[in-house]
Amino acid sequence: MSERIFKMPFANVYPLYINKVEKKGRTKAEVDEVIMWLTGFTYEQLVTEIENKTDFATFFANAPQLNPAANSIKGVVCGVRVEEIEDPLMQKIRYLDKLVDELAKGKALEKILRSN
């Protein structure tokens, strides 16, 4: 299962993230902001990854720097606690899923981005 997710183009999942949050009154710009916060991508780099249909493994390998506060992302995604996921790539993917979930649930952006 993990291998299938790792090879899945990020561009296939990105519109699903946007659709999920827009149904709850949030925006594409907020999705982009949480992705850039987590990965260190600029907006232009993010667009390039999407246009290139980069798979998840390459997407995270290309990420300039995982945000140092990412390890403060806690909670359950798909029935699994993100802080207990052992595979580093799967954990990064689930971190992103958790951030999008928090956005969809109406959590304040400052809290999602772990601002002090």
Image (cartoon, rainbow, N blue to C red):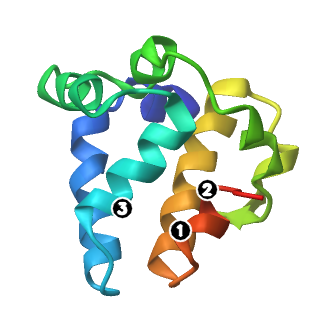
Residue 1 visible here: no
Mark 1: amino acid: Leu
x, y percent for residue 13? 30, 48
Front residue of 12 and 31: 31
Mark 2: amino acid: Leu
Q: Residues within 10 Å of mark 1 (few under 14, many from 20)?
A: some
Give the number of the disc on residue 109: 1
Q: Earlier in the sequence, mark 3 or mark 1?
A: 3
Q: Residue at x 51, y 31 (%)?
A: 39
Mark 3: amino acid: Glu
Q: Are marks 2 and 1 in contact (CB under 8 Å)?
A: yes
- Residue position marked by numbered label 2 in the rendering: 113
Q: Marks 3/2: CA distance?
A: 11 Å
Q: Marks 2/1: CA distance?
A: 6 Å
x, y percent for residue 41? 40, 27
* Secondary structure beneath label 2: loop
Q: Quadrant of residue 18?
A: bottom left
Pick the quarter of the image with the N terminus.
top right
Q: Are marks 3 and 1 in contact (CB under 8 Å)?
A: yes
State whether residue 76 is above or below residue 40. Answer: below
Front residue of 82 and 65: 65
Give the number of the disc on residue 30: 3
